[in-house]
Image: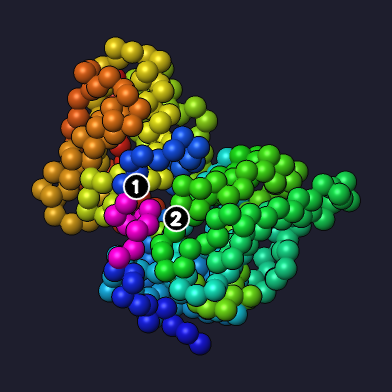
Amino acid sequence: MKTMLFFTSLLVCLTNISFGQSAEGISGKFDFIPGEKIIFFDDFTNDPVGEFPAKWNSNIGGDIVTHESIPGKWLRMKAQGGNYIPELDMKFPENVTIEFDVLITDNADFAVTYYSEQKYDINSYGVPGEAGSEAMLSWASNEFKSYSTNESDEGKEILSSNEQFPLPINEVTHVSIWIQKSRYRLYLGTEKIFDIPKGVFSNFVYNRFRFETSNSSSDILIGNFKMAVGLPDTRNQLITKGRFSTSGILFDVNSDKIKVESHACIKEIAQVLKENGGTKVLIVGHTDSDGDESKNLELSKHRALSVKNYLEKEFGVDVTNVRTDGKGETEAVVDNKTPEGKAQNRRVEFIKD
């Protein structure tokens, strides 16, 4: 069995969207908007290296690893392995976003399945549950399929493939999935791989998400897994309610550099500001409580300024009436004791001034 701890020195020079690459210059077709209310987040911070993560389940096992050239901790999913399922005891919302970072070092492939299951079966392979939507991500190509056990859905299943943007080897790639009722969208980095209006059979209750690695020839690393509720028309709250707060604008660790997956969220805010020209706005940055309090305060101010500059540079927003400030960790909206809480507290707030 290969181990993901034996990465080559090539990783030192990674050019990827999750670590070190700015969102500047992203094309307009990248329209992914992260959900605002985080319902599950795990960066494996609280899990010891060498152990299986506490908030996950598997029928084959795996472990938490680190790498000298890449920040954070990672879940190593075994080659020719099995199922890896976050323990989420809930009905998923109709509008939901799922995000994670992935790294492969060989000819790997794995499935991500969003499905409906009445009786929990950790050992289920193939197409689990009563209905689902599954993407197979691979170094060679990507495939999508939907399925249903309802006779009325017979003949409506969808099969699709995309060979144009395979999963890159030896690069950290951010994967984003956006489900809105029956519509299924999946992105690798800034590239939209699938956009299928009827990709989800909407007459089911969806409650399960799974990684499946049984066909992979090498191990796979997963990090920064997040699931969030997409809230409709939240950005217009700035005009209608005078305040809008978002955890969808993300930055590199301990940095004011905006991550690429924030582009569409900021674009929506830019459109609101353009449509309401002359509106005075205060942009406020917030952090979690990790690290030094004074450094967090300074970092939050720099992040707010980065957002202002991004609005002007990328979208041509007139920022004459835009001020910035930062509150650091002083105005937490939830407890910082959990990964979900920390992710919720790392936010940017827009206030009518």
Q: Amino acid at mark 1?
A: Lys
* Residue extending furthest toward the left: 294
Asked whether the residues under the numbered discs 1 and 2 touch, taking CB atoms below 8 Å apart as contact, a structural biologist would say yes
- The vertical placement of 144 against 171, above or below, is above
Q: Classify residue 330 as left or right of residue 109.
A: left
Mark number, residue 50:
none
Residue plotted at (34% across, 63% down): 14
Residue indicated by mark 2? 174
Q: Is residue 59 shown to the viewer in this render?
A: no
Write down the region rendered in magenta. Answer: 13-21
Residue indicated by mark 1? 259
Neighbour tally class for label 2: few under 14, some 14-19, many 20 plus, Cα within 10 Å: many
Residue plotted at (18% across, 32% down): 325
Q: Is residue 105 shown to the viewer in this render?
A: yes
Q: Nearer the viewer, residue 229 or 6?
A: 6
Q: Nearer the viewer, residue 112 or 118?
A: 112
- Residue 64: quadrant of the picture: bottom left
Picture coordinates of residue 76, whole percent (x, y): 46, 74
Residue plotted at (52% across, 62% down): 167
- Residue 283: quadrant of the picture: top left
Picture coordinates of residue 238, whole percent (x, y): 37, 22
Q: Is label 2 in a helix, a strand or a loop?
A: strand
- The vertical placement of 280 against 159, above or below, is above
Q: Classify residue 47 as left or right of residue 293.
A: right
Picture coordinates of residue 301, whole percent (x, y): 17, 38
Q: Amino acid at mark 2?
A: His
- Residue 185: quadrant of the picture: top right
The magenta stretch spans residue 66? no
The magenta stretch spans residue 20? yes
